[in-house]
Image: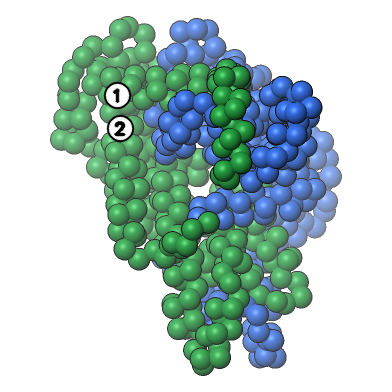
Amino acid sequence: MTTLPTDAAVVTPPATTQARPTKKPRPAGTTAWYVTALFICSVMIVPLLWMITIGLKSRTAVFDIPPKLLPHEFTWSNFIKGPEVIHFPRLLLNSTIITALSVVGGVMTAMMAGYALARLRFPGRKLWFYLFVGSMLLPGVVGLIPLFQLYKSIGWYDSWLPLIVPAFLGGNPLFIFLARQYFLAIPYSIDEAAKIDGAGHFRIFTQVMLPLTRPAWITMSILAFQASWNDFLNPLVYLYSSDKWPLSVGMASFISPFAGKTPDWSYYMATNLLYMLPPLIVFFAAQRYFIQGLGALGSTNQK
Amino acid sequence: MSRASRNTMSRNAGSDVKAAYLFIAPAIIGFTVFVVYPLIRSFYLALTKYNGLTDPVFVGLGNFRRLFTVDPAFWPSLRATGYLVVLYVPLSLVLGLALAMFCNQRFAGVRVVRTLAYLPVVLPAIATITLWKFILDPQVGLLNTILQRLHLPTSLWLQSSQMSMPSVVLVMLWGVGGTMIIFLAALQAVPTELYEAARVDGAGSASVFFRITLPMISPIMLLQVILQTTAALQTFNQPKILTNGGPGFSTNVLMLSIYNNGFPNLGRIPQLGYASAQVWVLFVIIIAVIALTAKFTSLWTYSDNTPD
């Protein structure tokens, strides 16, 4: 434990001394703030820049001792050969299919359940709400072994179905909760007006409610995208053949030591950058929904 | 819910019931198949000897007896899990809150800091973990390279049994932006009048923090304690990829042990019953943590009792 406490020590003091958020900053405080900000930013960004430099180094230069921070010749071919060796295009395709389907399924069924729980009156409404919310507390690992055996017995083992079908069956109770909270905030006079116009529940849901709840389902889609794109344990357990693997399992298997062979880090890091790109694009395109979604989580829990 | 809406709802009660159950049918099926069934089945399997090929054989509490008295790997894995939680949760909360307060100020460029701090959370977990595995490489990794240039002591990180768990936690803490962003939302919900009143009364920053900020965000703090602790108890990706449990048993957390017993490498027989027993130990710990946190914190969390 020689180095860990240092970043704690650097980050904490400004936070306590500048606790008041709405004050004109004093010049001394300003300098301290920017120095700390620079430190935080470099902690976050330097590892990523270093990853890119590794991706540009030749495979022998990676193991130079002492290590050089910058490559002296740029091996751009790593960005072609790396993905080829790791079978990146196929993994990307697999990940895209799995993620797209589970996002659609998860968001759709959660929105439907949220609509019923928030806006329709039926016996058992409270009970189902508490059951769904309660199941948020259930750790995913409890289901792992029984479900693995279940999938095996119905021939779903080594297929994408265990990764996709649960999403279509209300997969994430957090989404049901978020959807219900959002639906509760919409004035009921809107349903009433639609009903007077003769619209059924299906039409109210698809044509009135879905446009009104756009922020909610965009937020959920992002969360679902992240969850599926990042999922490692489930595909690791349910998929055996490497040609069905998503990126998470495929990438991890490339660097796990196999038969005493050192993994090719420059190939790996070049490909890793490509692996990071889709979530990065989603993040920068829909940044406000990231913040909004978690803010909603914060404010609903504060009540 | 307003009175008007109640009337509307009861008027259409008949058609609502059918529609409602159609709308939540997928969720109900999912709840039955993916929550109720596994819960019961896993409890039963925990009481059996089961290799996944032949039928499970009921052994009562035999698995638990073996766990607590015979298995040389169980207590170390429980200790490793506890060590991880004790290191990670407080650090994540303190750093997350500190970062949130740091980013909750009016400086030009604060958005950049906030975005960059949240960036590691956005990146795929496997991508960042594998990146850190190489950063922590003792010979050619970035961290030792930097430490050497600054003439600071270096370490074997993941390869030393003393530093392996702190290194795993260090990798997890790179994602502290996730904790930060929830605290940030909580901080922004604190009414600014409170701070202004405190300033008029001449309160110092320390007392503002302990008397206003902390009490006002205490419900979120409770949520964070529960979220972070349960997540930390279920840590799998980091130890699996960074160390695979080693060196020795130093990072062999409970989840990894469950995985290795239930889904071993080719050639070894899966012990699904035994792994289920471990799952239930973990499950009981998680429930206990949630219950205890909720019980203890009901004394000190601030709750707004005014009607909505």
Which label is found at residue B280? 2
Colour of chain B, in one word, is: green
Label 1 SS? helix
Q: On what subunit does the disc labeled 1 rest?
A: B
Q: Do the residues labelled 2 and 1 touch (CB within 8 Å)?
A: yes
Type of amino acid at the residue the image marks with label 2: Trp
* Image side of residue A246 versus residue B174, left or right: right
Residue A53: name its quadrant. Answer: bottom right
**Horizontal side, residue B65 vs residue B188: left or right:** left
Give the side of residue A256 with respect to residue A34, left or right: left
**Residue A84: x percent and y percent?**
77, 30
Q: Nearer the viewer, residue A15 or A292?
A: A292
The x, y position of residue B164, in whole percent, is 42, 53
Chain whose colour in the figure is blue: A
Q: Position of residue A74 (x, y in %)?
A: 83, 51
Q: In this view, does B113 lie above or below A191?
A: below
Q: Residue at x 17, y 20 (%)?
A: B60
Q: Nearer the viewer, residue B155 or A251?
A: A251
Colouring mode (rainbow / by chain / secondary structure / one colour) = by chain
Q: Name the residue under label 1.
A: B43
Please report the residue visible at 65 percent of the width from the left and 25 percent of the height from the top: A105
